[in-house]
Amino acid sequence: MAKSYIISTLFLLGLVIIESSILSNISFFIVVPDLILIAVIYLSLLNGKTYGEISGFSSGFFLDLITGVPLGFNCIYRTIIGYLFGLFSESVIISGIIMPVLSVSIGTILKRVLVILISFLFPKINLYIYGFISQEFLFEFIINILLAPFIFKFLGFFKKSLSIKDPKDMIDNVK
Amino acid sequence: MAERNRFSFRFKISEFFLILLILISGTMLSFSSGGFVLNFKKIGFSVISSIEKGSSYVVNGVKSGFSAVKELRQLKKEYNELVVKLENYEQMQRSNADIRKENERLKEQLDFATSLVEKNIPAQIISRNLDNAYSYITIDKGSVHGIKKNMPVLAFQNGNKGLVGKIIQVGTFTSQVIPIYNIDNIVSARIQNSRDLGLVKGLGSQDQPLVLEYIRKRVVDELSFGDVIVTSGENNNYMKDIPIGTISKITVLDYNSSLKIELTPMIDFARLENVVVVNQVELNDRK
């Protein structure tokens, strides 16, 4: 179990580095695709709500450290997203194309809702918060759902290392 | 009884963790401007951004390896051209030395003095903001290279000098720059021709214009599109007369005594790769 937490944390740290040092320098991306969000959704659906919220928190913490965002901003909403997707870990099949696309599209919308809510609850945070009807959100939404099946498939190769469940107990989330 | 059980909520370890993690995040967020958390953040920033810098070097190394062959051919051609130019410059230099000496003599006579000595620290951008929530740029120079908080950051693009922003966070090997288009960055500025004083604010995205505020309505006739806005030098963050942008739109608001002026930044941030951090060292004021 501890091994799985360590591996997933390293995975998330790697994705943070990829996002911030490689993808952020590609001018085509108006908004960098949120690979970390996709990975957190995958881990939550694979391992449940406790795992999901811890993954969400740790990924948010890395992001807060590396970006100029006030510490805790990414932690809060990514923890909640991890928890909420973890609730469906035993009822959602994460293989294929439809479920990754559907779950990541819900996750991206949920992220925007929570970001707007946090900026409302913490008014002193001076951030540029874009709404649903914006070029940035539309771009982020499309690029996230396009990448979701590939990221899910890629993480699927490491399922044994990332899963905390006994493979014998798994019904659908392993292959 | 069965009805009550169906709607009961069982408090488990995951819910406990959820509340705990949200409380930790909320506390960090509330106190993120306080000393303790800021220092903690600085350490974290140093560690992770150093890893980021390493990965950036690897990517750049691979990229530059591919372009090296092409560059070599180009360099050879340029070398031959430069040899010819150098001969011309050597001749010009002799006459320049005489002019420089004469200039120094004249300066002494006019009692001019150098008030600021600027030490430039060139740096490369290694990462940018992930979304537009908080705009920042990370550069590959940190405290070991002499970078300090609030140092101004400039860039040269197409032969023009322009303001990029200022340093807000300094790590050991990397630093974070708050660009002028960040919603938090406010720069004291002047219109270069009329010398009217105002404040330049960003709107949070590099695709949006900058806004110049607090320029009186009565000067509207003196303004024209393309006028250059420069730093006023009135706060200690920036030197005087660094170009910020040019006027692209002027709006007269009935309810406001000031004009709303939109600016196109002097620097095209989408194409920005290298910057110059300026270390201002005050040496001697007017004699």
Image (cartoon, coloured by chain):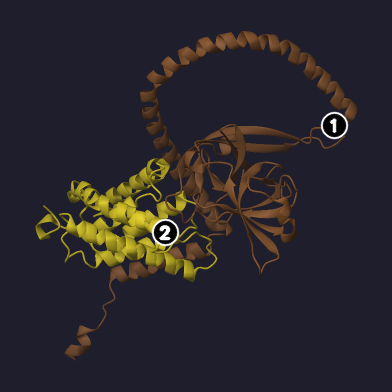
Q: Colour of chain A?
A: yellow
Q: Nearer the viewer, mark 1 or mark 2?
A: 1
Q: Residue at the location (49% across, 36% down)?
A: B273
Q: Quickly name the residue at label 2.
A: A74
Task: Give the vertical position of A74 relative to B10 (above or below).
Answer: above
Q: Is residue B7 visible?
A: yes
Q: Is residue A47 visible?
A: no
Callout 1: SS: loop
Name the amino acid type tagged 1: Phe
Q: Quadrant of the N terminus of chain A?
A: bottom left
Q: Nearer the viewer, residue A120 or B141?
A: A120
**What is the number of the mark on residue B112?**
1
Chain for numbered disc 2: A
Q: Nearer the viewer, residue A56 or A4?
A: A56
Residue A43 location (% of width, % of height): 25, 56
Q: Colour of chain B?
A: brown
Name the amino acid type tagged 2: Asn
Query: Share a chain, discs 1 and 2?
Result: no
Q: Residue at the location (52% across, 55% down)?
A: B204
CA separation, marks 1 and 2? 53 Å
Callout 2: SS: helix
Residue A101 location (% of width, % of height): 23, 57
